[in-house]
Every structure is written in C-alpha cells, then in structure tokens.
Amino acid sequence: MTAPLALTIGDPAGVGPELAAAAWALSDTEALTPFFVVGSARAVEEAAQRRGITVPICTVKTPDEVADCFAGALPVLDLGDLPYAPGEPDDAGASLALNALVTATGLVRSGAASALVTGPIAKSRLARVGFDHPGQTEFVAEACGIAAENAVMMLAGPSLRVVPITVHVSLRSVPDLLNAELIRNRAAITAAALVRDYGIAKPRLAVAGLNPHAGEDGRMGTEDAELVAPAVALLHEAGIDAFGPLPPDTMFHAEAREGYDVAICMYHDQALIPMKALDFDAGVNVTLGLPIIRTSPDHGTAFGIAGTGKARVGPTIAALRMAGECAARRALT
C-alpha cells in the first residue's frame, strides 16, 4: 500500500470542490488510489450538494487516517470553514487555495502523501494574497529545491504525450528562446521520467521541428538545422533514443504516434493543439524533473460554470489515476 494522494481544492469559487466530490463518488468504479482533499470540508460538502450528488465527508488531521474512512466518505484535511460561493472568487478563497497548496506540497515532500494533484487556481487572485510565482508548477519546483527551468511540463493522455520546450511565451519570442542545450536538457529530463514513473525502459522521443517541413533544408528557416538537430545529436550521445527534427504536420496521425512515446515540441500550441484534439477530457498536466509526483487536470477554474454541474469530472479522474499509477511504480523502486 502506498500513502494516499493529496488533492488540493484549488480556488474554492471554481470547479475544484465539486470535481473533488464527483471524483470520490466514482472512485470505486474508476478504481482510484485513495486520496484526500486539502482545503475546506464545508466548501466541498456544499459543492457536492449543489451538484446533486451524495458525498459523505470525513475530516482528517493526518493522511494516516485516510485509509480508514475513504471507502465510506471523502476525507478532507480541513483548513478553514469557508462557505461555497461558486463563481465569486475573493481573497479569502485565494488564501485558502494557497494554504492548501503549501500544506499538500509539504505532506508529499515528507512522504505522508504519495503524490500531489493540484486543483485549478486563479493566478491573479493568488498574487493578491502574496503568491509571487508564475504558477503552481514553479512553486512546487522551488519547494522541492528544483530550478524552474528543470521542471518540465508534460501533457499526457491515452493517445499522446507531449512536452513543449517553451510554454507561455509569445510565438514571436520562441526562436530567440530556443537553444540546443535547452532542448537537450528538457528532453533528457522527460526520458528519465518516462523510465522511472511510466515504466518505459527505452523511451522513444520524436522531436518536432520549429518551422514548417522542419525548415526544408533551410528554405523555411535555419533554426531546425542550427538548434534542433544539434540537440538531437546530444541526446544520441547520451544514449537516448531521440529522432528529428520532424515535420510537425505529419507527427500526430495515428500511424505516426505508434512510433514514439512522447513528442518533444518547440512551443505551446504545437504541443497542446494535437493533445487537446485527441484527449481533451483525459489529458493530464504532469510536472517532470521533481523528486515528487505532481499532476493536475488540464483545465482552469471555470468560474463561469462553477456550481452548475456542467464541469466534467474526467480530467480530475485522469489526474488522480495517473498520480496513483506513478506513485505505485516509484514505490517498487
């Protein structure tokens, strides 16, 4: 038995509380690893009622108590008696979300919980209460003593895994940010994580070109020959099965996907458009390169539909399942 998973509530005015409750309601049929919510028991209970599902709540003081109550109730590590106000974010909710993130990260780092699953937050709201990181990924990396550039975002689903080398930057700035060492480093971190957490003994990395047709011998740009190809050569020297640069427009059809385990992409949309087209409801945001396991549903707070029952629970279930599977593999090593 591994320790339970820690699921943060996210912003309590968003869809996080109701999706936590909905995931527990399906935990038996979905065969999920036991988990507990870090946040507000009242908010989760009222969110479940608003969604029209019956979810008994048991408050716990430590993760050790989760195993005894998970089968009959959703365990919640209660950090505050906050009422549920869907679609109405405020500073009190942001403070709770931040407290939940800090608390859950500490529990996973200590080994009391086996993996961290983060609910969606509103970055602008967190900034108002003293959160000075670009996002949860950077916070967790710093808490683990990992430089932000060594925390790699992978989006993973049943059909595809993708890693964008550059993430939330303008398309205009991408060529200036890319270099062979950056590509090599993030690809190598990805390969190591696929071995350790996904049980792939010899990961195959398909490396996308930056330009159409991977530059077509320089006629559509020289970056692929000058930046991407040298990175692939460095990966070969390290014994990693990487190939490319490949024309991005022919990488993602079904037959092509059978030839690799992860696609290394040069920018955000090059990675996320095919990912969301193929696995929109089952995509999981995974942070690689950390000493702990961290996953997250691949969506935001969705304040506009919070409390309406329209939010789909699939991404939360997928994030919990992937965290549990990775934790089980690490427990065997």
Image (spheres, rainbow, N blue to C red):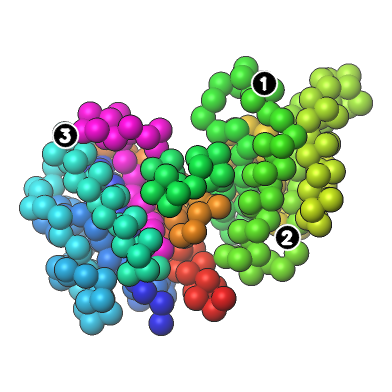
Residue marked by disc 3:
91
Report helix, strand or loop for mark 1.
helix
**SS class, disc 3:** helix
- On the image, numbered disc 2 is attached to which residue? 203
Q: Quadrant of residue 275?
A: top right
Provide the residue span drawn in magenta.
115-135
Numbered disc in front, either 3 or 1:
1
Residue at figure coordinates x 31%, y 41% from the top left: 121
Rate crowding at label 1 as few (under 14), some (14 to 19) or many (20 or more) other CA atoms within 10 Å: few
Residue 35 appears at what percent x and percent y?
32, 68
Q: Is residue 214 visible?
A: yes
Q: Quadrant of residue 171?
A: top right
At 33% from the left edge and 50% from the top edge, which residue is drawn? Answer: 119
Q: Nearer the viewer, residue 302 or 95?
A: 95
Residue that label 1 marks: 176
Q: In the image, is 99 to the left or to the right of 176?
A: left
* Three-letter code, disc 3: Asp
Between the residue at mark 1 and the residue at mark 2, the CA separation in whole angstroms equals 28 Å
Tag 3 or tag 2, which sits nearer the N-term? 3
Q: Specify whether 73 is left or right of 207.
A: left
Q: Compute the Cα span from label 2 to label 3.
A: 44 Å
Amino acid at circle 2? Pro
Question: Please, what secondary structure does the residue beneath circle 2 have?
Answer: loop
Taking the image as shown, residue 282 lies to the left or right of residue 180, namely left
Residue 16 visible to an observer of this rendering: no
